[in-house]
Image (tube, helix red, strand yellow):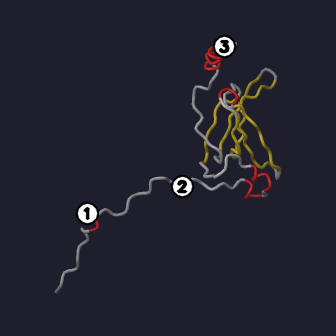
């Protein structure tokens, strides 16, 4: 097949709402689950430990601790079964894959350093600093 034709077909399958999350973020993934003739939304929350692939084949792995046992799920990013991805907390990491979290126990298994606010409020400006009233001499 022609690559341009494949690109046109794939472009119709992409997710309309862009998923703005990165490795290290704590997310809630809303997935559609079919039980008999009913369909409901099930939420899986945890830390994103990796992303791989590109285009329609992009996948991300979410890990959480459930009843003392580590549980990982791999979700296709552009799947119609994934309803939405909510970011609970932004994480600051220095790795593309956080496989070292698998060896950790307890709170350390979910602990990822939280991203700090980039713009700190400015200190007192020079105009307000000079406006302090000086004590008067008697």
According to the image, label 2 marks what residue? 116
Callout 1–callout 3 Cβ contact below 8 Å: no
In space, the residues marked 3 and 2 are separated at their CA atoms by: 46 Å
Q: Residue furthest left?
A: 138
According to the image, label 1 marks what residue? 127
Badge 2 crowding class, 10 Å Cα cut-off, few under 14, some 14 to 19, many 20 or more, is few
Q: Position of residue 86 (x, y in %)?
A: 62, 39
Report the front residue among 132 and 123.
123
Residue 49 in the image: above or below residue 15 = below
Q: Is residue 106 left or right of residue 124?
A: right
Q: Quadrant of residue 14?
A: top right
Give me the residue at 19% from left, 81% from top: 136
As drawn, the label of residue 91 is none
Tell me which label, 1 or 3, sits earlier in the chain. 3
In space, the residues marked 1 and 3 are separated at their CA atoms by: 66 Å
Q: Quadrant of residue 130?
A: bottom left
As drawn, the label of residue 2 is 3
Report the front residue among 69 and 8.
8
Secondary structure type for disc 3: loop
Q: Position of residue 129 (x, y in %)?
A: 28, 67
């Amino acid at each position: 097949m022609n690559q341009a034709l494949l690109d046109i077909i794939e472009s119709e399958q992409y997710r309309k709402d862009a998923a703005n999350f990165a490795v290290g973020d704590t997310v809630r993934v809303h997935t559609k689950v079919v039980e008999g003739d009913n369909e409901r939304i099930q939420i899986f929350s945890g830390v994103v430990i990796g992303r791989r692939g590109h285009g329609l084949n992009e996948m991300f792995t979410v890990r959480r601790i459930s009843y003392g046992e580590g549980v990982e799920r791999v979700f296709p990013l552009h799947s119609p079964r994934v309803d939405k991805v909510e970011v609970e907390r932004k994480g600051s990491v220095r790795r593309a894959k956080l496989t070292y979290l698998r060896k950790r126990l307890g709170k350390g298994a979910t602990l990822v350093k939280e991203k700090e606010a980039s713009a700190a409020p400015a200190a007192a400006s020079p105009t307000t600093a000079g406006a302090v009233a000086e004590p008067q001499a008697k």
